Image (spheres, rainbow, N blue to C red):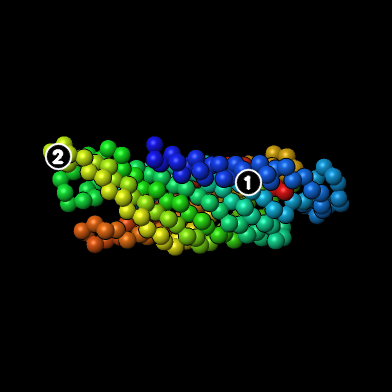
Amino acid sequence: MKRLIPVLTVLLVLASVTTAMARNTGYGRDRHGRDYRPAETYHDSYVTLKLGVFMPDDDTDFLDTGISIGGALGHNLNRNFALEVGLDYTVADLDETYDYYDEAVDEYDESYVSTLGIPVTARFIVPLSDRAELFAGAGVGVYFTEVEIESRYYDGYPYSDNDRDTRLGFHALVGADVELMNNAAVTMELKYTELDRDSDDDSGGDFEFGGTTASLGIKLRF
């Protein structure tokens, strides 16, 4: 239940921004450089809302596949370049076979890793047609991570722990937008995030929270 609170909070923020931006129907130049027509105006800014699957790195054996929700507010500086700031929330369960502590832990009742990120991305855009375009980008971000452990010892007594940290992260992405109407498009994205986080376990190693997110969403231009 606790993990639903940040999910719902992110969804509420993104939905509010998306709704507000969708009401903006200003007119301007044609987005493909053609003569002005009211039915096909160019929208310099956009907002996205995405839902995806998070796949941890292959060497990250303590995490299961998770889910990710997020969005971004961006601005096209020109036809081929855009800047955006995002809000992403990712959560993945700890694998039941992973021995996080030296204590004799029987099983994890509800143990997971969550990350709330604020990434800034520069995008390079390649229009394929009036209705479709490819993009690639990279950027940095601030990520707030949390490890939540709720488990039981072999003798049956419950055990819980919570560990938080803040880290810088780096990401790269590729994707495509397919326009549905003048100011709305379906967006598909594949993003890799590199994010290392110090752990407090006795192994002395680092928790690596990096992975790939495949997402599908909607983009509204305004």
- Which numbered disc, 2 or 1, marks the residue that appears first in the sequence? 1
Q: Residue at x 46, y 44 (%)?
A: 6
- Residue 201 picture quarter: bottom left
Q: Position of residue 38 (x, y in %)?
A: 85, 45
Q: Position of residue 58 (x, y in %)?
A: 35, 51
Q: Position of residue 36 (x, y in %)?
A: 86, 50
Q: Is residue 138 left or right of residue 77?
A: left
Name the amino acid type tagged 1.
Val
Nearest the viewer among 202 and 136 is 202
Q: Is residue 44 left or right of residue 176?
A: right
Nearest the viewer among 1 and 34 is 1
Do the residues bearing badges 2 and 1 touch, measured as CB atoms within 8 Å?
no
Q: Is residue 76 left or right of residue 156?
A: right
* Dot 1 crowding, Cα within 10 Å, few <14, some 14–19, many 20+: some
Q: Which mark is residue 17?
A: 1
Where is mark 2, residue-wise?
Answer: 154
Q: Position of residue 175 (x, y in %)?
A: 57, 50
Separation of residues labelled 2 and 1 (CA atoms): 48 Å
Nearest the viewer among 17 and 221 is 17
- 36 in relation to 7, above or below: below
